[in-house]
Amino acid sequence: MKRRTIGLVAVVALTVTALVNVASAGAAGFSAAEYPALIERENTTSLQITSGPISTYCSKKTGQQFPAYGTLNSEGEAVATGAGQNESYTCEGKLFGKSILEFKNCLPTFHPSAPGKGLFDVGQAGCGSVILDTAEKCDYSFGPATNLPAEYSNQSDSFGSFVQVHSSWAFAYTAIGSGCSETGEMAFDVTWQMKAKNEGGSRVDLNVETDGFSFAGGTFEAEAYPLTVSGEQDATKTHTFTIGPNTIRCTKAHLVADQLLAAATQLTLFPEYRSCTATRLGIVFTAEIEEEGCHYVFHGGGTADLLCEEGWPLEIWVKTQNKNITVCHYRLTSQSGREGISYSTVGEGTKRGVRAELDVKGIEFTVVSGSESACGKTGAIGRYTGATTLLGPSS
């Protein structure tokens, strides 16, 4: 395992604000930087129609006005795009040869529930049918369909963020024409990009937002899984580790959580800290740490653990500013049950999360090298404080 030297790290006494965006069917959706937002839907791939091993590929019909538009009036709404448009595609391939696909106002409505998850509908009540007009004996009519699977992802370009939607679905059809009585399904596959503009016509950010990470009764819970959170420390509360006479602070602290697959009574977090200094009697030193192989566990009951792989302890060096001389070398090994955490659910809507107030004392350390006056002594007790914000992927 390769070890990194990246700055101060510690498990046991910080303030964590977990603002986590989570999938929540019916409680999540699109979020724009301004409202109302005009949503543009544009195909980024040809619409592929497959029956058995044979496919045809459909592109926009020449002379039509694209992209299709819809309006997002508030956060979390579903978005229907293309209302009032008879969206048509020219299709060509081994399946039916040249043909025309007409949506006849049966156009998509999108229902994201999280990045990577969601549904969409094709058509609404009374919209008619989607028609595949072939050059062969039979044409095909596809009725409106709801709750079709879709994958939503947040993307960005030079103008800001947008949402990409990909879907593959089985579309039931009825064959129409003289002597045509066949029914069945064809596979449709397409990728769209959805971008937002304000009332002035300027691009604004559009994202898939989610909510629903909370803490109650000793349990961390999301409304949909899996969930992965990560985040930086709060700028106003840098991570501070006190060992002996040394106060060590980090200006950059990054934590990444293990994937949460279900409601849990603990969170496993992997640390990465940089740009640390140590202060003693007004003198500023540099601080470095090798933390790879160690992780933190925050328990809903209010305790924290530092867990390290065998042979890979957490090691901290305090050095002179030019890093030529090591003043103190500390070593921390696995230790559990350090008390001092309280949790609360904070925020509203897409910013709801869990705030964990930590001031955990009782950190055990070993002085590997350095004088007792400069470094303290083995067996003394350390402390860790600070603040961190954890965010889900949609943030």
Image (cartoon, grey):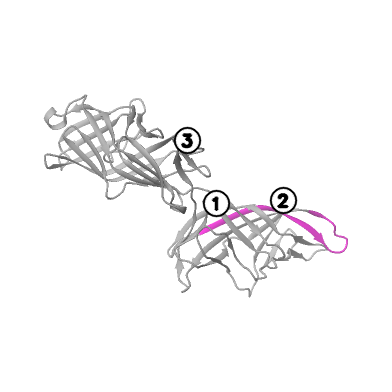
Of labels 1 and 2, earlier in sequence is 2
Q: Quadrant of residue 70?
A: bottom right
Mark 1 is on which residue type? Ser
Mark 3 is on which residue type? Ala
The residue beneath circle 2 is 53
Q: CA distance from mark 1 to mark 2?
A: 32 Å
Q: Quadrant of residue 167?
A: bottom right
Residue at the image point whose x is 65% and y is 64% from the top: 107
Instruction: Tell me the element at label 2.
Output: loop
Estimate the x, y position of residue 74 in percent, counting from the top left.
Answer: 51, 62
Of labels 3 and 2, earlier in sequence is 2
Of labels 1 and 3, earlier in sequence is 1
Task: Say which mark, if any, is on residue 113.
Answer: 1
Left or right: residue 84 compared with residue 286: right
Q: Are marks 1 and 3 in contact (CB under 8 Å)?
A: no
Residue at the image point whose x is 87% and y is 64% from the top: 178
The magenta-colored residue range is: 163-183
The residue beneath circle 3 is 264
Estimate the x, y position of residue 6 in percent, counting from the top left.
Answer: 28, 41
**Disc number lying in front (1 or 2):** 1
